Amino acid sequence: MTKLDFERPIIQRINAGLPSKYGMSHRLEPLSHIDGTPIKDLIGEFGSPLFVLSESTIRKTYKEAHRAFSSRYPNVKFAWSYKTNYLNAVCNVFHQEGAWAEVVSGFEYDKAIANGVPGELILFNGPDKSTEDLQKAIRNNSLIHIDHFDELYEIIHLSKEMTERPKVAIRVNMDTGIYPKWDRFGFNYENGEAWDALNRIMANKNLDLMGLHTHIGTYMMSVEAYRIAAGKLADLAIKLERKHGHVLKYIDMGGGFASKNTLRGAYYPGTDTAPSFDDFAEAITSVLMSSDIKPDHLPMLILETGRAMIDDAGYLVGTVIANKRLADGRRATILDAGVNLLFTAFWYEHDVRPVQPVSDQTEDTTLYGPLCMNIDVIRGNVMFPLLKKGDQYVIKRVGAYNNTQWMQFITLRPNVVMLDSKGNPHLIRKREVLETINSQEVMPEHLKQFKL
Amino acid sequence: MVKIKKNIAISDSGFVFDPGSGDSYSLNPSGLEIVQLIKSGKDFSAILEAVTEKYEVDSDSFERYYYDFIATLAQLHLTDPDGKE
């Protein structure tokens, strides 16, 4: 006689709260496959935990975003935001789709060049560009987005020494009606600093003013802010043409589009609240199209959206280490991936699912990572199925910022694989080993020996 | 031996009512089965035997789940504090 499946015994208090017509189901549907490939097999081959990136999701999302803008505006270009995920395989998928590179440091700049991106198709943002970085960018005809006056004067100085003409834009910050107002990057619109900077560039005969750039915030859930920002940049473009007869090549609206992840403390899930690419595109392009910019002078529209482009394509899969009971009786489940790998757990309520089929029983659970640190919490309170030690889990929408902000803390970083369009896994970043870390350290001679 | 408090009402569908606190609870099927075995006066080894015979679970795993479950019952004040395992 075959035995029946056993489920952990549990008892739960029945809380008869106020009925809510918005009440959401607690059932978490298991997710056993990614792009048709069993998660169990991926963990078996590449270990646990494991980052899995879906190439077809990246391409699908890119095409969706591109279509939303290009169907509304004649000249659209996307630039891949390296800081969001600069694994070379990820960057190259975007470059194959036609995206330029958007970088914010010398390191990212070199990464883009090494990936084969032509210098003139690299947008160089960020407040920290060394003299060597600027020289390299000028030599390669890259598009330098100036952040502050010190940088502007350094570029003017370099332009006198070098034969190439620097191609520049300024970064403009402004009040778009949102809080907090991002005013630390670039030149302010309202107090006239941005206009002042543009005039100084125009007065200098060695610099080519190519465009205007803004990056109004991150995880923006309001398209209205983009409408305001696009309007203010269009005003600057019109003033430039009126005063200097100068026609800009591009307007760069930056990124910051919200992804479908749910922010901590949000009442509704991100899948319901995040505006679509069409919403953002409509807000931005309608302002530019109806502005006073002459139709044949409409600048190229550049977008640098990162988060909304890659978040859905990333998964973190792994294994349950243990279950325990907390002092107040709540359940705690310890996962083998913590905030060291999932930095975004600090601001998202990530969608964590079981891999294997589970019963309808759920329990109020805290999901901890494996670190010996109190802050290592993946989900504070979640109605979660009764997973046992050794069961597998998958965390959805982890493609943005985790492969760049992860920490080598307490433990080593795991393998990263990308599933191609047929669902075949390709290792794109090898797991770290002790030697990876130790190879960067140098031991002084007098500390090499010890006796205990 | 663990004892469930005498005044606790437990239905056949796993609904539990504690008249002392007014709280109600629900048991999953395996939880209900174990509570019924406890109520019938069985000790851990007898319950272990009954469960492992019927279900696909090894004795080490069951022991872990059992004591975790009993601790939860105690935390909810559903067991008799005098009863000891």
Image (cartoon, grey):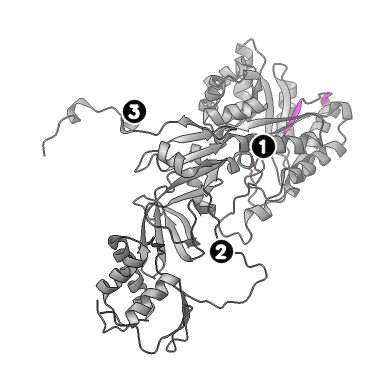
Q: Tell me the CA gap for discs 3 and 1.
A: 39 Å
Q: Is residue A259 magenta?
A: yes
* Residue B77 visible to the viewer: yes
A306 and A294: which is toward the camera? A306
Of the pair A402 and A209, the residue shown nearer to us: A402
Residue A62: x percent and y percent? 67, 35
Say left or right for B34 vs A284: left
**Between marks 2 and 3 in the image, the one whose residue lies nearer the viewer:** 2
Distance between the Cα atoms at labels 2 and 1?
29 Å
Share a chain, discs 3 and 1? yes
Is label 3 in a helix, a strand or a loop?
loop
Q: How many marks?
A: 3
Which residue is under mark 1? A60
Amino acid type, mark 1 = Lys
From the viewer's perspective, is residue A118 above or below residue A427?
Answer: above
Which type of secondary structure does the marked residue at label 2 adopt? loop
- Do the residues under discs 2 and 3 have CB atoms within 8 angstroms? no
Magenta segment, principal secondary structure? loop
- First-in-chain label (3 vs 1): 1
Residue hosting label 2: A26
Q: Which mark is residue A440?
A: 3
Bounds of the magenta segment: A244-261
Callouts 2 and 1 close, C-beta under 8 Å = no
Q: Considering only vertical position in the picture, is B27 above or below A386?
A: below
Under mark 2, the amino acid is His
User: Reading the chain from its start, which is encountered first: label 2 or label 1?
Assistant: 2
Q: Earlier in the sequence, mark 2 or mark 3?
A: 2
Q: Is residue A17 magenta?
A: no
Q: Nearer the viewer, residue B62 or A343?
A: B62
Query: Mark 1, residues whose alpha carbon is within 10 Å: few (<14), some, or many (≥20)?
Result: few
